[in-house]
Amino acid sequence: MPITAADLRAAAQTAVGEDAVRDTALVGGTAAVRLTAPADPGQHDAFIQHAARAVAAADTRAGQSLRAITIELLDDSGRVVQSKTYPAVPLEDAAQHHRPISGLRPQPAPASSKALPDVRHVIAVGAGKGGVGKSTIATNLAVGLARRGHAVGLMDGDIYGPSMPTMLGLDPLEASVVAGMLQPFTVHGLKAMTIGKLVDPEKPLIWRGPMAHGAFKQLVEQTNWGELDYLVIDLPPGTGDVPLTMAQMLSLTGAVIVCTPQKVAQDDAVRALRMFQQLGVEVLGVVENMSYFVGDDGKEYDLFGKGGAAKMSKRLGVPFLGAVPITTALRENSDAGDPTANFKRGPLADSLNALVEATESQASLAALRQGKSRPTLNIS
Ligand code: ADP
């Protein structure tokens, strides 16, 4: 009998204590375990080895079905501070070599993306229909990730209706090309590129399928993104040619789906979710935007039926990443091109930070499942 998810969790908990185990996942022969890092960095290696050894032992007891074991250590803010991946081998071999987990060796990480090998996580933000706040969420997600110390790019892949020039305040800036490559705009602590700065903003952007494909491809390939921890891509609404192009070109960590609480918005969101699944893109989770209203009195008012998206996520078995309130500040800051202002104190900032943290967590879990996690230290 192959090792079960319950065996894996039990083994990790027995090894390092119940409180230290954040998540465990068992996917395609890889066991992934995320632990709270010990306060003393000097103990990190031993902690990882201890956990890996316990998982290897549980796998041996269950008849050895694992191909790899990945252990990640996270700090209090959920950031990965250390990560190791080992091919799983029989524990008897380890005993022969008199090493704690000899035979378990870090594996080289596979390239994370087809077209962008220097980008660790590509996250697409999609929605079933327009106007639900997809671009707003993509922008704030990117800004929030950058505020947490990551190198972040934001690509406006909504080539039919680019909104980044306004949302990021790019209007006074000019696009520049160096050595044949578009230079991204460095704003709000991130690198951004939008077709809205390359075409006449007054002209409607009517793209037929092959043109849409070409425009998207150019934004991905001809922008000088450099090394990034995250590239957030704002997709056009609905289920068109662009997501297909994207899935063919890039190896995505996953997609985030934005919807509003209403039933009709959720029906559209389910279609978007199915599309990503058909394209082989993992769904990192669902965000409920315009979930509730926070009055000047600081009280929450339920306008549209808060909680619909959380229920939908549960029904579909995908994570719920968070609810963002409808606030005047968010609209005003978007119109003014100042997304950083959304992260000042208050309910809006709290909801955005929670969303960013949940997405970061789901992205690293997804990367573990996909075997993209990068070991940072080798053991000999
Ligand atoms: P989409 O990309 O889904 O078409 P946008 O992100 O462009 O939608 O948002 C549409 C409009 O709604 C924008 O003016 C934006 O500022 C506003 N908006 C989005 N989310 C919120 C929110 N939570 N509170 C207030 N206004 C919002």
Image: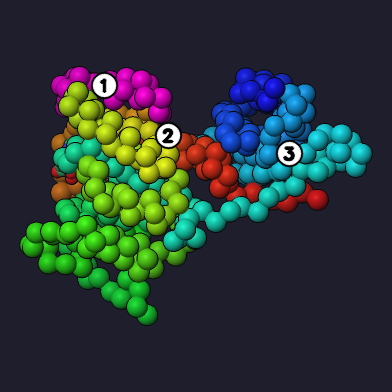
Q: Residue furthest bottom?
A: 179
Q: Earlier in the sequence, mark 3 or mark 1?
A: 3
- State the colouring used for the structure image: rainbow
Callout 3 environment at 10 Å: few (<14), some (14 to 19), or many (20+)?
many
Callout 1 secondary element:
helix
Whether residue 366 is situated above or below residue 181 in the rendered picture: above
Which residue is at 67% across, 21% downward?
7
Label disc, if present, on residue 358 of the rendered structure? 2
| Left or right side of 315 for 200 | left
**Residue 87 visible in rendering:** yes
Kindly indicate the quadrant of the structure image that contains residue 1: top right
Instruction: Identify residue for label 1.
Output: 308
Looking at numbered disc 1 in the image, what kind of residue is underneath it? Gly
Q: Which residues are magenta?
A: 291-319
Mark 3 vs mark 2: in front: 3
Q: Could you say where residue 261 lies in the image, as x and y percent from the top left?
A: 22, 25
Q: CA distance from mark 3 to mark 1?
A: 42 Å
Kind of residue indicated by mark 3: Ala
Taking the image in four quarters, ligand 1 sits in the one at: top left
Give the structural element (helix, strand or loop) at label 2: helix
- Would you name the residue on which mark 3 appears? 88
